[in-house]
Structure formats: C-alpha cells, structure tokens
Amino acid sequence: MDLDTFFVSVERLMDSRLNGKPILIGGTGDRGVVAACSYETRKFGVHSAMPMRMARSLCPEAIIIRGNSANYSKYSNLVTDVIKEEVPVYEKTSVDEFYVDLTGMDRFFGNFKFSSELRDRVISETGLPISFGLSLNKTVSKVATGEAKPNNKIFVQKGLERPFLAPLSVRKIPMVGEKTYQTLRNLGVRRIHTLQEMPLEMMQSVMGKHGAVIWHKAQGVDQSPVVPYQERKSISTERTFAKDTIDVVKLEGIIVAMTENLLISCVVGISLLLVLLLKSGIQTLIPIRFRRVYHIQRQITFSFLKSRSFFKNSLNVDYSFVWWVFVSPI
C-alpha cells in the first residue's frame, strides 16, 4: 500500500485552495531539491529529487512549499494506526509505504475485498488517497501498486505474475536504479519480457548475485517475508548552503553542531535502555558510528539523569570514525 503523493496530499488537506494546482515541496533556495511534487507538475517533466531550480524552470506556475515534517509524521501515524487495527502483520518501509501480509486470511475473507475495505477506511478516516497492489509477493505487489496510481488498486492473481510484469520497463523492478538500468540497456534489455527470456547464467555472469536477484524478480518470484520490525542501521543529517563557502571556522562549527545533534538523537532513541542499565548498575559500552569527510577535534560533556554523565570524548573525524560513549555508574 502506498499513499499517493503523500506530502502533497497532506498539504492539500491543510489548505484546500491547493487542490488541482501544481505543487512542489522541498528546499526553496536555488540549491533546494524537490522532495515531492503533484501530478500536475509531472506532465512538465518534474520529478522527485530534481533540483528545485530546474523544477521551477520546467513548471514556473508551480506553488513551492517548504514542507512540515511534523504534519507528515502525524498523518503517517494515523494511517499506521488504521492498518495496525485491521491486519495481523504489516511492515512500514517508509513514511508512506506499507506491506501487509494477508496469508491465511483468505479462509475467512476475500483478500481483495478485505484490502479494498482497508483502503476505503484509510481514505475515509484520514482523507488521504492511497493505492495498493495485491499479489503473492512483495515485488509484484510493489510494482502493481505503482501501476495502480493514482488512487486505485490492482489484483495480480496467482500464475499471472510474469505476464503482468512482461510489458513493463525494467526500471520498474525494485532494486533497479539508474546505474543498473544503464547496464541493462547496454545489454539491449529495456522491457521485463526481455529479461524474463534471458538465461539466469547470463545475468549472473554480468552482474553477479545482484543480477540473479533481479532475474528472479523479473520472473515474479520473491521469497522475502513481510518484516514487522527492522532495526535502524544509521542516522544522518545534512546541510545545504545557499552559496559556496571556504570559511573553515564556519564549516567546523557547523559540522560540530551537526555531530552533536546526531548524538543527542541517539541518546533520545536509547534513553530507556540507558535508564535500565544505569539503574541496574551495569557498565556498558555503546558504539555510535558517523561518517564525515572533514577533520575536527572536539571535547564534549553530556549530563544524563543528573547523577550520571558521559565521559568527555575527543573526536578525530575522518571518512569514518567511531564515537565511543561510555556509561558507568557512580
């Protein structure tokens, strides 16, 4: 299930005057990037991740909105609550995308009927348009969802996965990014049908294990399960300057501030774990990894629970480094 042009839809819920108008959401400066765009702008060639300056030149009449992450999180959680109440297992892969496992439910409900009713409930309770693709696996369902948009649904029945995928561009296959797409085009592969007819060994010889995975996806085969929870691997932050700068002092201060904010985010996320560890008198070592491309040194002391403190840390920041945070009872 995928919420259609989610950021744009939320903005239109907040302000109905935006309905039917071309909308761009993202950084408003010349170096800003389009985070989301309405369907009205796409006919001019605008797409997500495009530089805002280029998007404005393609669609000068577009309304540019900086966006509000708090509102987007709020509505994403509303949709999540609806899905959580209705289905036994779901996986939230992003703020606006969900996988739902309905295995076994066809004994009691028609899966397509159930999915349609779930979609109707999301729309009625949140006001947000949402599309879904129903099939035997995650790959076909994701592709079907994309084909169902805007605000529609597709059911790919068992045994029809290959013919459903065959006429589509190989770019539609999950995992096929721009680089992989160019590699496939160089092989003369533009449609999934061509990939389906290729020997598996050829894809493996050209692209290794990655090629084998793509080949199986093209056949409509995907054994990956719906995972209710995935551990977050990393956190990051970034800053785009309106103009180039060679002010080293300014850059150092900004990088230190960004690093501190990342650490604070980590502390907030693991605060409950630390409370339990500190109360039990256990000494622990928590590695927090950051990636940086600038050399700085900094000592920082963070207080925690008033009676505990993090040891001072000297940071030697290179292309990658480990910031060791020690927690020790008094």
Image (spheres, rainbow, N blue to C red):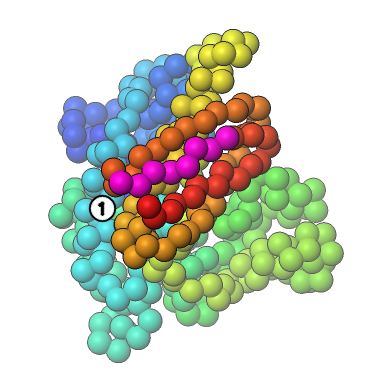
Q: Is residue 308 magenta?
A: yes
Looking at the rendered structure, the secondary structure element under dot 1 is helix
Snapshot quadrant of residue 163 = bottom right
Q: Residue at x 43, y 35 (%)?
A: 301
Residue 169 higher or lower than 40, as above or below? below
Query: Of 190 and 281, which appears nearest the observer?
Result: 281
> Which of the 4 image quarters holds residue 89?
bottom left
In the shown orientation, is residue 25 left or right of residue 72? right
Q: Position of residue 34 (x, y in %)?
A: 45, 30
User: Who is closer to the viewer here, 299 or 55?
Assistant: 299
Instruction: Provide residue 265's location: percent of width, then percent of height.
Output: 39, 42
Residue at the spot x=43%, y=53% of the render? 328
Residue 58 appears left or right of 6: right
286 within the magenta span: no
Tell me the quarter of the image containing the N terminus: bottom left
Can residue 105 be seen at all in this image of the molecule? yes
Q: Residue at x 76, y 49 (%)?
A: 183
Mark 1 neighbour class, 10 Å CA radius: few under 14, some 14 to 19, many 20 or more: some
Query: Going 45% across and 16% down the picture, which residue do you hit?
Result: 29
| Residue 285 locus on image (x, y percent) | 51, 56
Q: Which percent across, then down, holds residue 122?
A: 22, 57
Write down the residue under mark 1. 77
Q: Which stretch is magenta?
A: 307-314
Residue reaching furthest to the bottom: 107
Kind of residue at badge 1: Asn
Determine whether 111 is above or below 63 in the image: below
Q: Is residue 129 visible?
A: no
